[in-house]
Image: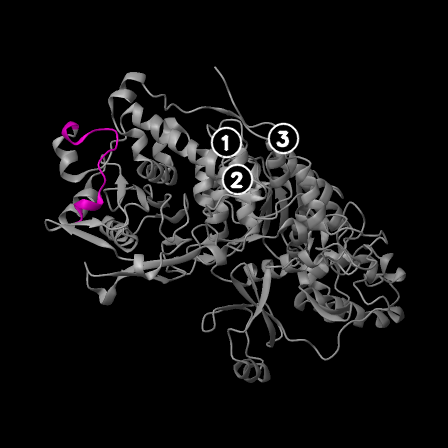
Amino acid sequence: MSYEQSLYKIVEPVKKTTISRLNKKRKWEYGYNKEHDIVVISKTGKIGNILEIQGLRIALPLLPLQLHETKLNKWQKIEYPKELSKLKNIFDWRNYPEESKDKWYDFIDEEFKRRDEGFWFMNDGEPTYITGSHYMYLQWSKIDVGAPDFREANRLFFIFWEACKADKRCYGMCYLKNRRSGFSFMSSAETVNLATISSDARYGILSKSGADAKKMFTDKVVPISINYPFFFKPIQDGMDRPKSELAYRVPASKFTRKKITTNEKQEELVGLDTTIDWKNTGDNSYDGEKLNLLVHDESGKWERPDNILNNWRVTKTCLRLGSRIIGKCMMGSTSNALDKGGDNFKKLYYDSDVTKRNRNGQTRSGLYSLFIPMEWNYEGFIDEHGRPVFDTPTRECYGPDGELIDIGVVDHWENEADGLRDDQDALNEFYRQFPRTEEHAFRDETKNSIFNLVKIYEQIDYNEGVKTDATVSVGSFQWVNGIKDTQVIFYPDPKGRFKVSWVPPANLQNRIIVKNGIRYPGNEHMGAFGCDSYDISGTVDGRGSNGALHGLTKFSMEDAPANHFFLEYIARPQTAEMFFEDVLMACVFYGMPILAENNKPRLLYYLRRRGYRGYSMNRPDKTWNKLSVAEKEIGGIPNSSEDIKQAHAAAIEMYIQNHVGHLGDGVYGNIYFNETLNDWAKFDINKRTKFDASISSGLAVMACNRHLYRPNAKIERQKLNISVAKYDNKGYSSTIIKN
């Protein structure tokens, strides 16, 4: 099966007639277009294709009538005339013979135009657009290998970055990358590009340490600046190769055709007063400064006591005046293990999701997140036209240096991963360095887990290879015609709070048994729900834990998959009552009972008040006559007992061992909810309140296996051991650590 890319797509959110009409009048303005909800990066007044990259719709310039072509039908640097290369600054140009200047005006003007508007060229027969920033990187930036290669991945990166710059709602980008993707050089090139056309501006650099920031400044930023052509290069103040600050005095903007022909004296030139510098890593780096651009390199590797979240809260204010955003942040990194700074970066990344905005149109962080999978940008698997070689070639294929590529990057990556299966921590490190999914990028170390992480990660990897849309539906439940206590229906809704992987056939939906005026679930023999509830609608900090609900089937003779987690709900609606109603509708629709913790009893009282006490399971470890008055009234199970905590964790452990990951003969488990799997991976039995999904799913397992906890003389006499084992997760399969 050939690889199908999902990084970007061409969309048509605007009518073609509208585009054509406004193109004729050159009415498309650079920036965010609220009417059509697109970000226009064209500076010509005309737009062409609209790309959607990770939820952001970006309008490219219209294809021009003429575009650049080369004999090799691919990107090639424009040859810099030798005569001009001898000129190091504007003063050399002033001393250049007047009669020789005329022939270079068009060349210089064209370079300024490309820098501003971008550049079109033919690439393997396809018209290809790159932004002005990307052009400056390819054409005029010197990196460690000389001139950068053109890569399709970098083209999309710069298009996304241009949209971040153009969008007045955006503070910049949060880029989740793979190792050696070129981010440090690209961000250094952009720093120099912007700084050399800005006045009275400051540009800053941060990294995982002050030493790393300094190295980026001295080894990347400064050499790029030094190697600019004279017509783009302002006069530097101070040393040729500074160690801490690069200061520009004379602006490149003076070097237009109009100005370049004048005979202004040196002392009459107005300085830029623009600087580029770096700071030591810390929460308060650049606090109180005004920045036009902040480059945040290796932001996923900030380890304690440094905290990228705290730093961003501080430095974000450096990029705005009041509500007006005056600067941008270019943030990019691979991720460390979660307890080594990765967790903070993960939160920042997901807080930058462009599909989740507040009423001001901004993401929670203010940044826009971008993830480019490793297969797009892996050394040795980029062809001569800059395109990634996803699949193993069926004909000869060569890289930019003429080397033969005889295997596809996906096959190569899978071979590498297979070779590390016997060392889960090494495999997870490989995933973090070269991620194909966001899940890979945020893989954690396995050392402290109480569960079999090998099986958990096997399941996650399997799920990522399955088309999720075909297995999991996102949606909501509602009462038919809005009339409560009738029948419930499920309807797909991308904004819904439920994830569902199985819906019972119509004859099994809404099965209710009424006894003595009390409603009981009609499908109790098929499965049950577990729930981690909450009582308070709002919290002081506006966060609070989520409510969680999980549905699990057990073996039955009905038309239903056995031992299958079919429902996941992890959310915190505006009010607790909304959550309670969500839970009730799910229980009614599936006709299954629920086991919930009774230390937060409002949900259980809500069910009782609505006439659904029969849906609330009693704790399975006690007979009816041993229950307290409150337990008889509302049901539920406490979370305070050490025995219950151990039994709960043991239930999850049992399910993982029997139904998760590779089960043999190429068969895998059928739990498709990666959020729950990741919660199990991190679960800490001593800090249970942080793991809503684990609490809820574990209660579902206990509810479906309540016979294991039923008190009887035999079990009480033998003191059944239900304690949780600890696993050594090294090797091909996890092994129990024996005391």
Q: Can you say which quadrant of the picture contains the N terminus?
A: bottom right
Q: Amino acid at mark 1?
A: Asn
Amino acid type indicated by mark 3:
Asp
From what the image shows, is residue 356 above or below residue 712?
below
Closer to us: mark 3 or mark 2?
A: 2
Q: Along the horizontal axis of the image, is 229 left or right of 375? A: right
Q: Residue at x 71, y 40 (%)?
A: 218
N-terminal label among 3 and 1: 3
Around disc 1, counting alpha carbons within 10 Å, would you say few (fewer than 14), some (14 to 19), or many (20 or more)? many
Q: Residue at x 30, y 27 (%)?
A: 644
Crowding around mark 2 (Cα neighbors within 10 Å: few <14, some 14 to 19, many 20+) is many
Look at the picture and state if 384 lies above or below 554: below
Q: Which mark is residue 423?
A: 3
* Amino acid on which disc 2 is placed: Gly
| Coordinates of residue 431 in the picture (x, y in percent) | 61, 41
Q: How far across and how far down the image is residue 76, in percent? A: 81, 62
Q: Is residue 327 visible?
A: yes
Disc 2 target residue = 661
The reply to whether callout 1 and callout 2 are in contact (CB within 8 Å) is yes
Q: Which residue is mark 1?
A: 452
Residue 620 is one of the magenta-drawn residues = yes
Question: Which one is in front, 60 or 660?
Answer: 660
Q: Mark 2 falls on what kind of element?
A: loop
**Of the pair 321 and 500, the residue shown nearer to us:** 500
Please say if 61 is above or below 579: below
Residue at horizontal 51%, vertical 38%? 456
Image location of residue 697, percent across then percent down: 37, 40
